[in-house]
Amino acid sequence: MIDGDTIEIHSQRIRFNGIDTPETKQYCSDAKGFDYPCGRRSAEALDAFLTASGPVQCKFVTWDRYHRFVGDCQRADGVGVAA
């Protein structure tokens, strides 16, 4: 896992199609104005979600502007990652 919307499989970075999450080191402000590590929390939530049913399988959709593989990915139980 790279961050909340990107993983790496066999040295290939794969960005999930249709979602965008904060970068790993990014902080956000909550409703009361307090900063929290939203990027790290997003990555941790993805890790827990993927660990629940592996392995992940991805189908190629396109390349993004950073030349990353963009894919539609599913856990082994058929749940779509971007959903």
Image (cartoon, helix red, strand yellow):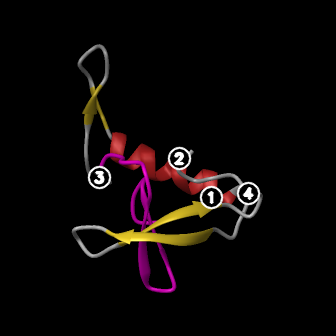
Vertical relation: 64 (above or below) 19: below
Find the magenta span and give its range: 1-22
Q: Quadrant of the C terminus?
A: top right
* Residue sitting nearer the eye, 3 or 75: 75
User: Which residue position is annotated with label 1?
Assistant: 50
Q: Earlier in the sequence, mark 2 or mark 3?
A: 3
Q: Earlier in the sequence, mark 2 or mark 4?
A: 2
Q: Report the amino acid beneath label 3.
A: Glu
Would you identify the image quadrant in which residue 11 lies? bottom left
Q: Report the amino acid beneath label 4.
A: Gly
Secondary structure of the residue carrying numbered label 3: loop
Crowding around mark 2 (Cα neighbors within 10 Å: few <14, some 14 to 19, many 20+) is: some
User: Which residue position is annotated with label 3?
Assistant: 23
Vertical relation: 24 (above or below) 12: above
Mark number for residue 45?
Answer: 2
Tell me residue 66's x, y (percent).
23, 71
- Let me know if residue 20 is in the magenta part: yes
Vertical relation: 41 (above or below) 81: above
Tell me residue 67's x, y (percent).
27, 76
Mark number for residue 78?
Answer: 4
Q: Earlier in the sequence, mark 3 or mark 1?
A: 3
Q: Please, which residue is most extreme toward the front here? A: 61
Q: Report the amino acid beneath label 1.
A: Leu
C-beta proximity under 8 Å, tags 2 and 4: no
